[in-house]
Image: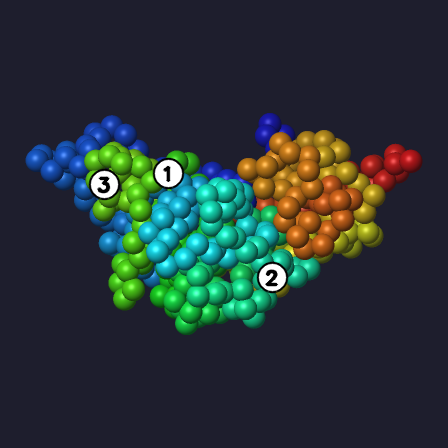
Amino acid sequence: MDRPIYMDYQATTPVDPRVLEAMLPYFSEKFGNASSGSHAFGWEAQAAVKRAREVCAAVIGAEPMEMVFTSGSTEGIGLALKGAAETCVPRGRHIVTCATEHPAVIDTARYLAARGFQVTWLPVDGEGRIDVAELAAALTDRTILVALMAANNEIGTLHPLAEIGRVCRERGVLFFCDATQGVGKVPIDVRRDEIDMLSFSAHKLYGPKGAGALYVRGKDAPVRLAAQCQGGGQERGMRPGTLNVPGIVGLGRACEVAAEELATEAARLTRLRRRLHDGITRALTGVGLNGPAEPRLPGNLNLWFEGVDAAALMMEMKEVALSAGSACSSTEREPSHVLKAIGATDRQAHASLRFGLGRMTTEWEVDRVVELTVRGVRRLRESAP
């Protein structure tokens, strides 16, 4: 094969041809600045941004005016956590998050801790789930913010967003959700789930890199965020700077396609994921599942192989592009913080691989990956001392 089979869809996704088609005109003939209000080029860009804002809001059950366009989830997370912390200081300095969050949340929480905020790190069970009762017990009259993800990028665990949101609303605490892996893959509704802020990225749902959105509640109980940079006042002053019109158009079209196909694609990916899991475990002993069997992020499968080093296994499987963990920490050889949090030993963590299935994954590819995985594991076990 000229290129490997792609099995790393939690790291990034290819741009869907329908998304690319929608974006292309905004690089050339429709190149206007969305802040230019005095001529047709600017109006054209404004209309495209308005349409994308409506679609992005609809996919999560929000209102268009509640969407702030960003460069992606990392920026959105920083704006939400730092911006909310800054405005809520008069009430308190206590933040609650979780041991299995993405590094963008963990590092931001540590940044705030170094500046005088108290951070409580909730533990998780062996499948990566928090105990909502423990969350409720951790809240105090000085708690200002809870930050918990929708779906874990490494082990596919889905947090009970509606339960978390209900606890936060009852206690008057802001609830921020990193939904990077969830939007367009599992149903999310910010009103139903009582979410105050939520971030996601285009490149995780077949859109372009460098585009994302942050939902900031503007109805019922409006959330105020302190801007983290200053400039032209775009995005209600929360994220100033010239809007990335092609990227925003791509994000909007990606959300539109994902919403239309969510149910059927989730079912297809769940079926393929089970086919992959069953194929590997029928042929091999000493294979464990990281994370829950169900419910789980449809396209995520994370397995550990007894007696095998994951880095060596990936070298055996050069026909497959996959990951041993988060793309943001793929150059590190420290055990995954997510796997350690669920109780995995160092040996199990170093023996774990993440298989990420997506929109372009076929049955043939799944069967081929089963074959290559089984062959690679057997070779390594036979050669092990």
The quadrant in which residue 64 appears is: bottom left
Question: Dividing the image into 4 quarters, which one contains the C terminus?
Answer: top right
Look at 60% across and 27% down and name the residue there: 2
Please give the count of numbered marks on the rendered protein: 3
For marks 2 and 3, the one nearer the N-term is 2
Q: Which residue is mark 1?
A: 71
Examine the rendered structure and indicate whether residue 15 appears above or below residue 256.
above
Q: Amino acid at mark 2?
A: Arg
Whichever of labels 3 and 1 marks the residue nearer the N terminus, that label is 1
Query: Marks 1 and 3: in contact by CB < 8 Å?
Result: no
The quadrant of the image that shows the N terminus is top right
Q: Earlier in the sequence, mark 1 or mark 2?
A: 1
Instruction: Name, please, the residue furthest toward the right.
Output: 385
Which kind of residue does numbered mark 3 sit on? Gln
Q: Nearer the viewer, residue 51 or 88?
A: 88
Question: Mark 1 is on which residue type?
Answer: Ser
Residue 177 position in % (x across, y down): 44, 55
31 lies left or right of 194: left
The answer to whether the residues at label 2 and label 3 have Cβ atoms under 8 Å apart is no
Residue bearing the label numbered 2:
129
| Residue under the image location 42 percent in, 69 percent down | 171
Q: Position of residue 302 (x, y in %)?
A: 66, 50
Mark 2 lies on a secondary structure that is loop
How far apart are the alpha carbons under marks 3 and 1? 14 Å
Q: Residue at x 88, y 36 (%)?
A: 384
Mark 2 and mark 3: Cα distance apart in space: 38 Å
What residue did someone put label 3 on?
A: 234
